[in-house]
Image (cartoon, rainbow, N blue to C red):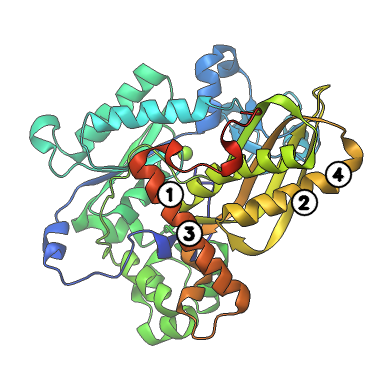
Amino acid sequence: MYMGYNDGSALMRTSNFREKSDDGATEKRKSRTILHCDANSFFASCETAIHPEYASVPMAVCGSVEERHGIVLARNELAKKYGVTTAEPVWQAKNKCPQLVTVRPTYGLYSEMSEKMNKIFYDYTDCVEPFGIDESWLDVSGSFKLFGNGKSIADSIRERIKNELNITVSVGVSFNKVFAKLGSDMKKPNATTVIPRERFVPIVWPLPVSDLLFVGSSTTKALNRIGVYSIGDLACCDESVIRKNLGKNGILLREFARGNDYSEVTVSGYEPTPKSVSNGMTFRENLKTRDDISFAITYLSMSVAERLRRHKLCCNNVAVTVRLPDLTAFSHSVSLAHPTCLCKEISKVALSLVYAKKAMWEEIYSVTVHAEKLTPEGDFGYQQKLFPEAWEKKYEKSHSLEAAVDSIRERFGKSAVKIASAIDNRLV
Ligand SMILES: [Mg+2]
């Protein structure tokens, strides 16, 4: 499951999926063995691991059931037999399967399990690249002597994860990342699929082109329009036709279909790219004055913005959740005129959101600032513009200022630079 981008273009820009370079390493990368491990029905499996009673009933993990617009985030194999699918509305799933047990997501559980899963991967190689919460690529080219070939490593990983964490994974084994990912989708649950270089054509080419990594729904439509339906069609498609209709990314996808993906498994630690960044806090006293609230929001926004910049992301949406002294809460959000990773801008919007709901509160018990709808930082690319607009120049300036503060805080510790009002503030 990868719940981020449904189309590849944004991701391709930010990841290391690039057309091959002639740096001499290409030849070496042809003989790699790469695994892609993908947990089956991850959220549902994690819930079942701590509530074994769910194993015998059709069950789905759903977002906000009581608000009636909840959707199915994951379902177990029994629910799947009733035709319950991921991302469908809960009411629709219940029509298909009236006895469906619905469970709210347990926050913290999935990242904890994800971390445990990645720790097992690290026993086989230190070259692990997590992709979303429940998937990782592993380059095991150097691990054969210790653990056997790709397939035996895959089988041993599956067995350990089943025994130690009580969840199942599907593993694809291939000579590049794109086909390894494809392989992990082919047999589920709890299976290993090998796509060797010598036999990839009969295995991969008959599959629908939408099975290929980065081919989302809009790319599929564009490919279908030019008569490309299978991965083989894409591999054999005329270069000029692809270039004309899909541009450079289309050519890259055609290379993937031909088995020419030379991207490396990038070691990035355990931290997956966040879907949203939030920071909330209950302050020592209830917030009453505009100064209190402005301070609280700036204080929270600082770390939200810093985390966005660390991941090279911007948000397109800012939201606040406000909890009142009687512990009732409300949330309010707004889409931004332009994406941002600046504390200055996020806090300004967040403050206006709190005051837009002034009728609802006298005092505030706690507040959370959320940065949502994240996109890669370079997406709006005004740095390259010859004639930037006034706000873009300003943004650029503030960005260098805030980034400079990040690097000072990184070198000398978080307390090296604080907002002036945080010094001896009674609230923190
Ligand atoms: Mg999965």
Sequence-first tag of 2 and 4: 2
How many badges with numbers are in the image? Answer: 4
Residue 352 numbered tag: 2
Residue type at mark 3 is: Leu
How far apart are the alpha carbons under marks 4 and 3?
Answer: 32 Å
Percent x, y of residue 109: 52, 24
Instruction: Determine which quarter of the picture holds residue 247.
Output: bottom left
Binning the other alpha carbons within 10 Å of mark 2 as few (below 14), some (14 to 19) or many (20 upward) gives few
Quadrant location of the C terminus?
top right
Where residue 221 sits: x, y (%)? 57, 70
Residue type for callout 4: Lys
Q: CA distance from mark 2 to mark 3?
A: 23 Å
Q: CA distance from mark 2 to mark 4?
A: 9 Å
Rounded to the nearest angstrom, the CA distance separating label 3 from label 1 is: 9 Å
Residue of label 3: 401
Indicate the secondary structure of the residue bearing disc 4: loop
Residue named by callout 4? 357
